[in-house]
Amino acid sequence: MAKVILKKKIDVQTTPLSEVKSYARKIWLAGLGAYAKVGSEGSEYFKELAKSGQHVESKGKKVVVEQLDAANSQIDQVKSNVSGVRSLVEVQLDKVEKAFDTRVASALNRIGIASKHDVETLSAKLEELTALLERVARKH
């Protein structure tokens, strides 16, 4: 027995439903095309992005290093200036201290109080006299 296959011809009329189906198929095909294109060209694009990122990173590092060096240089200059000012201040303080000591010693001397130097001189003379007296006392 022979099978008879009947083919039924369907008239495709332009209906809103067929337009939606056609549009949906086009969207599907566009998605597949984008997927295929990304699959073949995506790795190259990714490599280009990574290369651009490396370039930007190296530029950024260079700028940071330059700014850090400039800041360190300024810090060194400030330290140098501070040490110079410190030594000048110390010299001035020494001068002020000596002037103060001289005036205080002068004022104390005017009212009859001996200076440290006077006391040291008297102490040295007293030690000499004590030694001399001890020698004389031993002889007698």
Image (cartoon, grey):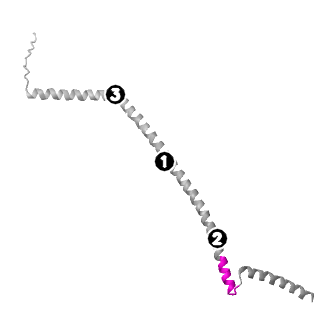
**Main secondary structure along the magenta-highlighted residues:** helix
In the depicted view, which residue is nearer to us: 17 or 83? 83
Q: Amino acid at mark 2?
A: Lys
Q: Helix or strand or loop: what does disc 2 sit on?
A: helix
- Magenta stretch containing residue 86, yes or no? no
In the picture, the disc for residue 95 is 2
In the depicted view, which residue is nearer to us: 71 or 45? 71
Which residue shows up at 62% across the image and 68% down it? 92
Q: Which residue was labeled with disc 3?
A: 41
Give the left or right position of residue 29, taking residue 43 as reference: left
Direction top: furthest residue: 1
Counting from the top left corner in percent of width and height, residue 130 is at 83, 85
Which residue shows up at 31% across the image and 29% down it? 38
Quadrant where the image shows the C terminus: bottom right
Spatial CA distance of label 3 from label 1 is 39 Å
Which residue shows up at 57% across the image and 60% down it? 82
In the depicted view, which residue is nearer to us: 130 or 15? 130
Which residue shows up at 19% across the image and 27% down it? 26
Give the left or right position of residue 40, taking residue 6 as reference: right
Counting from the top left corner in percent of width and height, residue 74 is at 53, 53
Spatial CA distance of label 1 from label 2 is 42 Å
Q: Specify which label sits upstream in the sequence, 3 or 1.
A: 3
Query: Which residues, given as a range, are shown in magenta?
Result: 101-113
Q: Which residue was labeled with disc 1?
A: 67
Q: Helix or strand or loop: what does disc 3 sit on?
A: helix
